[in-house]
Amino acid sequence: MFDVEDRLTLDERSTVDFVLGLRKRWADTVYPALAREYAATGEPATSIDEAGRTLRELPLYPWFSHLERVQQKMLWKAAGDAVLDRRAELTRQLTTVPAQPAGSLTLDPDLPLPDWYTDYDIHIQPGGFFSDDMSAYVYEFGARIVMLRDNDGYKFHQLFTRTALPDVPAATRVVDIGCGFGKSTRPLVGRYPTAQVIGIDLAAPGLRLAHAEAEAAGLPIDYRQGDGRATDLADASCDVVTGTMVLHEMPATAIRETIEEAARLLKPGGALRFLEFQLTGDPLRDATVYEHAERNNEPFFHALFGSDLVAICTEVGLTDAGWTPFDERRNGVQPEGWGDRSEWHFPWAVLSATKPEA
C-alpha cells in the first residue's frame, strides 16, 4: 500500500511542515512562556478551577488558546486535501486484499452508533472518523502530526505493547477495544504470537483501512465492527483486553460499561490494560488539559477524570487496579511519574487490573 505522505507535492509538504512546526512551538515555546507568566502572578493555585481563572487573565493566554485551536483546524485541512485528492487510488487500496487473507474483516451495517459517538466531530475532524472511507485515511495522516511525528512507525503503540502489557507465553486471544485504523492492534501480533488478535471498533471506515494495512503486512488480525460495551465474545475467553485512547471519548456510563465488558471477557488471571490520560496534580497543567479537551471537541474528558476507574475495576471483580504514568517519548510505563517536562504534553497513563484466579 502506498502512503499518502510519500506522494505529497512540494506545496502539500510545505503546508504539513508548517503545521507541524507551529504545533511544536506551541508546545515547547508558547506553553513554557505561559507557565512563566502564571508563576509570576504569585502564590500557585490549589485547584484546577482557580488555576483556570488565573490562566485566562494572562497576557499570553489569547495566543496560547487561539494557536491550539487554529493549528488543529489547519492540520485537518492539510490532511483532508491530501487524502481527497487521491480518493480513487486510496479507495482501490481498501478493496485489494490477498486471495488467501491472513486475517478477516466483519462489518455490521445495522450496528447502531450511539449518539455520543456521532454527535461530535471529535478532534475537530470534519465528519468525524466514521462518516466516509476517506475519514480513516485523514485521521491516520493527521494523527502523525498530533503526535509531533513521535509515533511514526507506531513507535508509541509498540512502546505501550512492550512496556505495559504482561507476558502471556501461551495466550490464545487478545482483544483491542476501540482499535480505530489498527495502529494499536498490529503490535499485538508480535507480542502474542500464539493468540487470536481481535480489533473491535464502531467505525467501518477505520476497520476497512485497518484490515487492508494488516493484510499488506501479512498480519493475522480479525477486525470486527462492534461496540466495545457488548462485543458478543464468550465469557472468560481473553487473556488480555486492551484499548488505547478510547475511554476519554465516552460518557461516564459508557466508560463503566466498557470496563464491565472487559472484566466479563477476561479469563481468570487475565489482564486489563487501557492507555489513557490522567490528571497530573499540577493545577496549571491540568487546567490546560481540560481546556485542550474543550478546544478540540473532546467533551468527555471530564467524564474520564470524574470517574474512579480503580474503584470501578474493583466493583466489577478485578484486582490490583491502578494507574501508572506513561512516557510516550522513550520510557513507556514510568512508575516514578511523568518527570520534569517543561513543554505541554498529554498526561498519558495506563490503567491496569487483573481478573482473579478461580
Image (cartoon, rainbow, N blue to C red):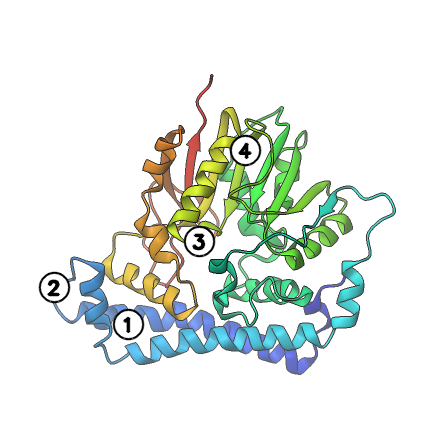
Of callouts 1 and 3, the N-terminal one: 1
Identify residue type, mark 4. Answer: Val
Residues at marks 2 and 4 touching, judged by CB atoms closer than 8 Å: no
Viewer-nearest residue: 134 or 278: 134
One can see residue 280 in this view: yes
Identify residue type, mark 1. Answer: Leu
Residues at marks 2 and 3 touching, judged by CB atoms closer than 8 Å: no
Viewer-nearest residue: 263 or 74: 263
Q: Position of residue 358 (x, y in %)?
A: 47, 16
> Is disc 2 placed on a helix, strand or loop?
loop
Distance between the Cα atoms at labels 3 and 4? 21 Å
* Crowd tier of the residue under label 2, counting other residues whose Cα lies within 10 Å: few below 14, some 14–19, many 20 or above: few
> Is disc 1 placed on a helix, strand or loop?
helix
Q: Position of residue 341 (x, y in %)?
A: 34, 57
Identify residue type, mark 2. Answer: Glu
Of callouts 2 and 4, the N-terminal one: 2
Q: Position of residue 111 (x, y in %)?
A: 62, 52
Quickly name the residue at label 1.
Answer: 34
* Crowd tier of the residue under label 3, counting other residues whose Cα lies within 10 Å: few below 14, some 14–19, many 20 or above: many
- The image quadrant of residue 180 is bottom right
Q: Quadrant of the N terminus?
A: bottom right
> Is disc 3 placed on a helix, strand or loop?
loop
Q: Which mark is residue 250?
A: 3
Q: Nearer the viewer, mark 2 or mark 3?
A: 3
